[in-house]
Image (cartoon, rainbow, N blue to C red):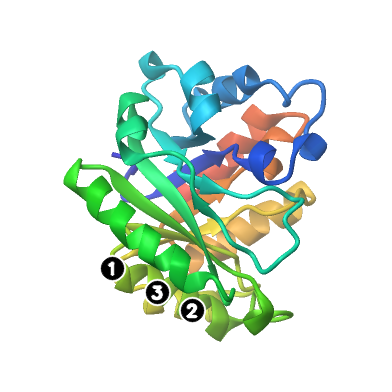
C-alpha cells in the first residue's frame, strides 16, 4: 500500500540513471542520504532503480519501495525510447510494493513501450504490486506541447486505458486545466511530477494547486533532496498533500 488517507507522496530518485550525476552534490549523490529522507515520515514510498534498491533500500524502514523497470540515458538523442531493464520478479525479490515504467507519449516508439508496459502491468498486478505509469508527453508529435492540457490529458487517459493504478504526469500550470487531466484519468490516480528545483514558495503553491485540481498526490525528487532542509520542506509538502 502506497497511500495514506487516500493520497500519495513519493520520493523519486531515478534521476541518476536518467540524467547522470549532474543533479547531485556531495550529499545527495549518496543514496543513503535519500533513504534517510524517505524515512522522515512524510512519504508513502521511495522510487529507486534496481541497483540502488538492491544496495540501499532498507526493508525494515517500512517505507514502500517502487522499483523503476525501464530507463534511458541523457546521451540518447533519437526519438525518446525507454525499454525494460528490470523484471517484475526481481522487483518482488527486492521487496517492492510497486513498479514504475515510463511511456513517452508522442514518440514514434510509443507503441513499443505501450506493448511492453501492457505485459508488465499484467505480471505486476498478478503479483499484487501497484503499477505506476510515468506518462510523459515527449517526441516529435508533441514537441513544444508537452505541458498542454489536452496533450497531458491524453497521456493520463492512456494510463487508464492501459490499466495503470497511477499515472505520473507533468503539471499543466493551473487548477482548471489540471482538473481536466484528473477527470480524463478516471479511476486511475493522478500524480504530478516534481520537476526541476524551483523556489520553495513557488513549489508549495504549485503543490497546493495540484491537490486542489483533484490529484491523488505527487512524485517529487529534486525539489526535496536538492533542498538545504529536505526534512522541513518534506513536512510542509506533506501537509498540503495529506491535508493535515
Above or below, 135 relative to 31: below
Q: Report the quarter where the C terminus lies.
A: top left
Relative vertical location of residue 125 with respect to residue 162 in this rendering, above or below: above
Give the CA separation, mark 2 to mark 3: 9 Å
Q: Nearer the viewer, residue 193 or 82?
A: 82
Q: Is residue 55 left or right of residue 16?
A: left
Q: Which residue is mark 3?
A: 158
Q: Nearer the viewer, residue 71 or 191?
A: 71
Q: Which mark is residue 187?
A: 1
Q: Which residue is mark 2?
A: 153
Residue 141 horizontal side relative to residue 122, left or right: right
SS at circle 1: loop
Q: CA distance from mark 1 to mark 3?
A: 12 Å
Decide which of tag 2 and tag 3 comes sooner along the chain.
2
Q: N-terminal of the two: label 1 or label 3?
A: 3
Q: For the point 68% across and 79% down, which residue is it?
A: 140
Amino acid at each position: 500500500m502506497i497511500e495514506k488517507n487516500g493520497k500519495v507522496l513519493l520520493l523519486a530518485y531515478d534521476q541518476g540513471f536518467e540524467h547522470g550525476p549532474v543533479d547531485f552534490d556531495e550529499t545527495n549523490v549518496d543514496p543513503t542520504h535519500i533513504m534517510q529522507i524517505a524515512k522522515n515520515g512524510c512519504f508513502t514510498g521511495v522510487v529507486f532503480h534496481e541497483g540502488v534498491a538492491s544496495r540501499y533500500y532498507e526493508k525494515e524502514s517500512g517505507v514502500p519501495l517502487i522499483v523503476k523497470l525501464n530507463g534511458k540515458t541523457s546521451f540518447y538523442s533519437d526519438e525518446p525510447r525507454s525499454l525494460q531493464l528490470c523484471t517484475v520478479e526481481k522487483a518482488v525479490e527486492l521487496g517492492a510494493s510497486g513498479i514504475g515504467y515510463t511511456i513517452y507519449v508522442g514518440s514514434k516508439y510509443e507503441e513499443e513501450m505501450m506493448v511492453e508496459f501492457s505485459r508488465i502491468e499484467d505480471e505486476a498486478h498478478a503479483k499484487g504490486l501497484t503499477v505506476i505509469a510515468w506518462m510523459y508527453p515527449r517526441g516529435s508529435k508533441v514537441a513544444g506541447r508537452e505541458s498542454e492540457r489536452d496533450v497531458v490529458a491524453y497521456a493520463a487517459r492512456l494510463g487508464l486505458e492501459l490499466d495503470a493504478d497511477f499515472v505520473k504526469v507533468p503539471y499543466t500550470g493551473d487548477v482548471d486545466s489540471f482538473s481536466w487531466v484528473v477527470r480524463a484519468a478516471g479511476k486511475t490516480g493522478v500524480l504530478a511530477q516534481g520537476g526541476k528545483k524551483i523556489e520553495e514558495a513557488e513549489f508549495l503553491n504549485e503543490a497546493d494547486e495540484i491537490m486542489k485540481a483533484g490529484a491523488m498526490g505527487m512524485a517529487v525528487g529534486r525539489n526535496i533532496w536538492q533542498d538545504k532542509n529536505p526534512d522541513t520542506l518534506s513536512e510542509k509538502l506533506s501537509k498540503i498533500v495529506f491535508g493535515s
